[in-house]
Image (cartoon, rainbow, N blue to C red):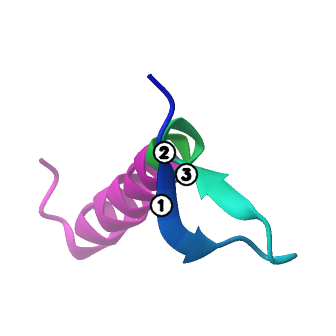
């Protein structure tokens, strides 16, 4: 089932829910890597 969110993409098109989830997952992965690097630099490796 494909659903659309009530938000618009960069060029005004509707964003598919699956595409939005993929973007969120990628953003979460980037943030996790960023914080891992910060912890590593601080000496608190997790």
Tell me the quarter of the picture where residue 24 sits: bottom left
Q: Which residues are magenta?
A: 24-46
What is the crowding at mark 2: few (fewer than 14 residues within 10 Å), some, or many (at least 20)?
some
What is the crowding at mark 1: few (fewer than 14 residues within 10 Å), some, or many (at least 20)?
few
Of the two numbered discs 2 and 1 on the same chain, state the one appearing first in sequence. Answer: 1
Horizontal placement of 12 versus 29: left or right?
right
Tell me the quarter of the picture where residue 19 sits: top right
Mark 1 secondary-structure assignment: strand
Quadrant including the N terminus: top left
Closest to the observer, 32 or 27: 27
Residue 17 at what x, y percent from top left? 48, 45
Residue at mark 1: 5
The answer to whether marks 2 and 3 mark residues whose Cβ atoms lie closer than 8 Å is: no
Q: Nearer the viewer, mark 3 or mark 1?
A: 1
- Residue 45 falls inside the magenta stretch: yes
Residue at mark 2: 17
Mark 3 secondary-structure assignment: helix
Residue at mark 3: 23
Mark 2 secondary-structure assignment: helix
């Amino acid at each position: 089932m494909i659903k659309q969110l009530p938000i618009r993409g960069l060029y005004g098109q509707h964003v598919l829910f699956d595409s939005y989830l993929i973007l969120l997952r990628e953003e979460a992965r980037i943030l996790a890597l960023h914080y891992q690097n910060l912890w590593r630099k601080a000496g608190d490796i997790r």
